[in-house]
Image (cartoon, rainbow, N blue to C red):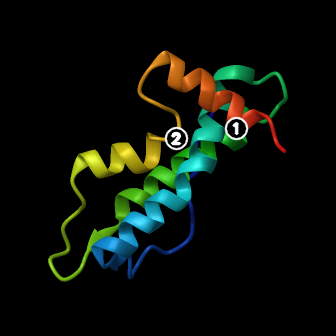
Amino acid sequence: MTIKFTKIPIFGMSMSRMDAIKRLTSYSNVLAEHILKIGLYGNQTGNLEHWAEEVANYLYISNAITIKPTGKKLVRQIYDDRLFGTIGDSDADVRANLYNLSVKP
């Protein structure tokens, strides 16, 4: 499987700290859903490559975000909390969040 990175230009990804956190948070549910689908289904549905590309693109774009005016990145804990917080920290969290993501109202 070859993962293709986005062809979307990422210039101008420097933003305020609050906007950067909002951007990361907006990716978290979709990222978690794709990671869980990869773990649950593998390539049973024929979508593994698509999901893996989506995850790679979210991580690539997230890595490009810098904070104005310094151009530095956010601290690691913010990335962990915002991008992967939806998945959870414990087995119980993962099970509960998997259920919440997979059961659509």
Image vertical order of residue 63 relative to residue 101, above or below: below
In this picture, residue 33 sits left or right of residue 90: right
Question: SS class of the residue under badge 1?
Answer: helix
Tell me if residue 2 can be seen: no
Can you give x and y, in whole percent of width and height, for residue 78 in the image?
Answer: 30, 51
Residue 101: mark in rendering: 1
In this picture, residue 79 sits left or right of residue 9: left
Can you give x and y, in whole percent of width and height, for residue 2 in the image?
Answer: 60, 38
Image vertical order of residue 16 relative to residue 27, above or below: below
Q: Nearer the viewer, residue 57 or 93?
A: 93
Residue 86: mark in rendering: 2
- Mark 1 is on which residue type? Leu
Q: Are marks 1 and 2 in contact (CB under 8 Å)?
A: yes
Q: Residue at position x 60%, y 48% from top?
A: 29
In this picture, residue 60 sits left or right of residue 17: right
Q: Nearer the viewer, residue 43 or 3?
A: 43
Rendered-image quadrant of the N terminus: top right
Question: SS class of the residue under badge 2?
Answer: loop
Quadrant of res 27: bottom right
Can you give x and y, in whole percent of width and height, for residue 65 in the image?
Answer: 35, 67
Taking the view exactly as shown, the residue that stands out farthest to the top is: 91
Q: Earlier in the sequence, mark 1 or mark 2?
A: 2
- Mark 2 is on which residue type? Thr
